Structure formats: structure tokens, C-alpha cells
Image (spheres, rainbow, N blue to C red):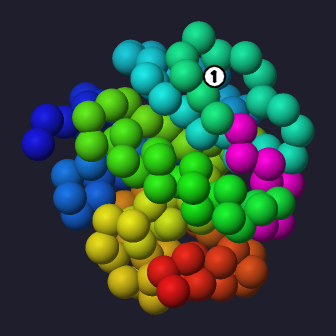
């Protein structure tokens, strides 16, 4: 399976299938290197415009997505596209919502739901998934 992001890409999470997804904080400048081909932006308000294809998943800070059904659909689409495209997930700080969404992608990729948060904390950011309800969302995402 081809690697779609360079291995040195900051914020890169490699899933067990070999898919790679970049997580990042929108409050920080866009990292140097290739831009995404597709992005999912996890914000309570409309994200800034980007030059690549993007979806907005309404997700207020420190909360859960406004629609769990839409979250499942959007995240499944991002996971599917990550097989062949550069996909990024991003929120304001790049930890809580982004970490939660990355853990959901890990579940879609076959990581047991009860282990997905620890996996993302080990391989993406030690502080990812910030609230108990975000952890619970990941566990339920697998069910």
C-alpha cells in the first residue's frame, strides 16, 4: 500500500492497515510540505476556506459531534480516502476533537474500541482525547 504522506510529516498517525492520516491544530500555521487532498475540520463554527476538498463536521470544543450519525459517515469517508489520498483531521488545538476522530478511524481500521484511545495517545499525541465523554464516544463508535 502506498504511503500518501511523507513519513516525516508532523502529526502523522499510521493505522494498522498502513493508511496514514495527519492530525493538526488549526491554530498553528500549516506545516511545510504537501497539502492534504482531503480534510475534515472538527469545529463548532464554519472552518476557514482551504484550497483542497474539505468537509466540516460540526463539533464544539470539549464536546461531542452535533450529530453522531453524520460523524460516523464523515469519518468513514475519511478513513476510506486515506487508503489512497493525503487526509487530515483538524480542530483548533489538535488534541481533543482531532484525537477523538483519529481514535474513531483506528476503530474503523480494526483497533478494538477499548484500545483505540491508548493507541492514538501512543502514536499521535499523549494528550489526545481530552474528556471522559470523548473516550466514551470512541468506545461506543465501535459498537
At a point 59% along the width and 84% down the height, the residue shown is 140
Quadrant of image for the N terminus? top left
* Residue 15 x/y as whole percent: 29, 58
- Place residue 87 in its image quadrant: top left
* Residue 132 x/y as whole percent: 72, 83
At a point 64% along the width and 16% down the height, the residue shown is 50
Q: Which element type, helix, strand or loop, lies under badge 1? A: loop
**Residue 91 versus residue 140 in the image, above or below:** above
**Residue 127 placement, left or right of 119:** right
In depth, the one of 36 and 125 nearer the eye is 36
Mark 1 sits on what residue?
29
* Residue 101 x/y as whole percent: 57, 59
**Residue 51 versus residue 132 in the image, above or below:** above
Q: Around disc 1, counting alpha carbons within 10 Å, would you say few (fewer than 14), some (14 to 19), or many (20 or more)?
A: few
At a point 55% along the width and 22% down the height, the residue shown is 53
Span highlighted in magenta in the image: 56-64
- Place residue 120 in its image quadrant: bottom left
**Residue 15 placement, left or right of 107:** left
- Place residue 96 in its image quadrant: bottom right
Amino acid at each position: 500500500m502506498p504511503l500518501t504522506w511523507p513519513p516525516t510529516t508532523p502529526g502523522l498517525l499510521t493505522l494498522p492497515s498502513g493508511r496514514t492520516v495527519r492530525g493538526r491544530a488549526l491554530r498553528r500555521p500549516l506545516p511545510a510540505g504537501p497539502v492534504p487532498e482531503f480534510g475534515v475540520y472538527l469545529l463548532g463554527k464554519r472552518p476557514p476556506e482551504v484550497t483542497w476538498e474539505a468537509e466540516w463536521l460540526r463539533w464544539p470544543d470539549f464536546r461531542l459531534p452535533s450529530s453522531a450519525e453524520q460523524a460516523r459517515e464523515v469519518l468513514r469517508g475519511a478513513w476510506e480516502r486515506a487508503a489512497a489520498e493525503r487526509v487530515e483531521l483538524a480542530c483548533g488545538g489538535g488534541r481533543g476533537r482531532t484525537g477523538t476522530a483519529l481514535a474513531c478511524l483506528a476503530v474503523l481500521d480494526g483497533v478494538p474500541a477499548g484500545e483505540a484511545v491508548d493507541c492514538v495517545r501512543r502514536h499521535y499525541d499523549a494528550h489526545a482525547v481530552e474528556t471522559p465523554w470523548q473516550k466514551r464516544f470512541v468506545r461506543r463508535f465501535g459498537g
